Image (spheres, rainbow, N blue to C red):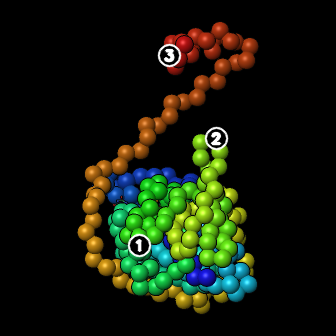
Amino acid sequence: MKILVCISNVPDTTTKITFTDNNTQFNTNGVQFILNPYDEIALARAIELTDGGNGSVTVINVGEVNTEPTIRKALAIGATDAVRINAKPHDAWFVAFQVSQYIKANKFDLILTGRESIDYNGSKVAGMLGELLDLPSVSIIKKLEIAGGNATVEREIEGGKEVLTIPLPFVAGCAEGVAEPKIPNMRGIMSARTKSLSVIEPVEVKTFSDVISYETPAPRGQVKLVSADDPAKLVELLHTEARVI
Ligand SMILES: Cc1cc2nc3c(=O)[nH]c(=O)nc-3n(C[C@H](O)[C@H](O)[C@H](O)COP(=O)(O)OP(=O)(O)OC[C@H]3O[C@@H](n4cnc5c(N)ncnc54)[C@H](O)[C@@H]3O)c2cc1C
C-alpha cells in the first residue's frame, strides 16, 4: 500500500506571535518550527499500516527550504521518502492544489492529512484535496483500519460516534486516537539523512485570498488574589470590577 502523508511546518506552541509589514506577515524571526502535531499522528498511523514491508509512506510538504528540518524529522520517525514542493504556502487552496497535482502524477492508495494545522487552523486542505482529486474525503477521524481495499474509520460526533466504510483511495484528516505519535530513535535519525527528499517546483495556480491584517487577542487583565478569609471582598470585586454579578 502506498500512503501519502501531507505535513505542515508550524510554529512551536510556545511561540510568542508577532507580525511585521503593517500586521500582514507573521514574524518568523527566532521562531522554532515543528512538525504539525496532527500530522505526526497521521504519519504514525501510516507507518503502522505499512509495517513489515507492507508498502511505503511518502511525506509531502509545500514550503521553502527552511521546512527541510521538519521534513527530515518525518523521515527520522519512519517515512520512506519525502517530497517538498518548493513554494511559500500562500493559503490552503494553494497547498491543496500543489499537492493534488503531485498525487495526479503519482498514484497513492491513501492520502492522510492532519485534522488542521495548528497555526492557521483552517481544516481545509483535506476537503479541498478530495474535491480536486474527485475522491472521498473524511474529516477529523479518530480511528482508521484497512482491510481488503476498504477502510473503516471512526468519527466523533456530538454525543456519540460515527463509523464509516470507504473504498480506497480516499483522503482523511487525522485527529487524536488514530495513533500515538512516534519518537524518532537514533537509527531513524541516522537513516533520515540519506533518505530521498525530492524537491519539485510548484505549478502555476491562481490564488483567491490575501491577508489584509492579523491581530493578536487583547492582553488578559492582571490576576487579583483575594484572601479566603475575605469573601465579602471577592463579592465586591466581582460586582464593581469584573461586573459579573
Ligand atoms: C511562510 C508562510 C507564509 C504563509 N502565508 C500565508 C498567507 O499569506 N495567507 C494565508 O492564508 N496563509 C498563509 N500561510 C499559511 C499556509 O498557507 C497554511 O499552511 C495553509 O494555508 C494551510 O492552512 P490551513 O490552516 O487551512 O491548513 P489545514 O487545512 O488546517 O491543514 C490540514 C492539513 O493539511 C496539511 N497541510 C497544511 N499545510 C500544508 C503544507 N504547507 N504542506 C503540506 N501539507 C499541508 C497538513 O496535513 C495539515 O494537518 C503561510 C504559511 C507559511 C509557513
Of the 4 image quadrants, the one containing the N terminus is bottom right
Ligand 1: give its quadrant: bottom left
Q: Quadrant of residue 193?
A: bottom right
Indicate the amino acid at tag 2: Gly
Contact, mark 3 vs mark 2 (Cβ under 8 Å) = no
Mark 1 secondary-structure assignment: helix
Please state which of residues 217 and 84 is positioned toward the viewer in this rendering: 84
**Within 10 angstroms of label 1, few (less than 14), some, or many (20 or more) residues?**
some
Q: Position of residue 103 (x, y in %)?
A: 44, 79
Whole-angstrom CA distance, mark 3 to mark 2, is 34 Å
Residue 1 showing in the rendered view: yes
Q: Residue at x 66, y 61 (%)?
A: 143
Task: Quickly name the residue at label 3.
Answer: 243
Badge 2 residue CB within 8 Å of ligand 1: no
Mark 3 secondary-structure assignment: loop
Q: Quadrant of residue 124?
A: bottom left
Task: Quickly name the residue at label 2.
Answer: 159
Contact, mark 3 vs mark 1 (Cβ under 8 Å) = no
**In this rendering, would 221 be left or right of 208?**
right
Image depth: mark 3 or mark 1 in front: 1
Residue 34 showing in the rendered view: no
Please state which of residues 56 and 109 is positioned toward the viewer in this rendering: 109
Task: Quickly name the residue at label 1.
Answer: 133
**In this rendering, would 144 be left or right of 118?**
right
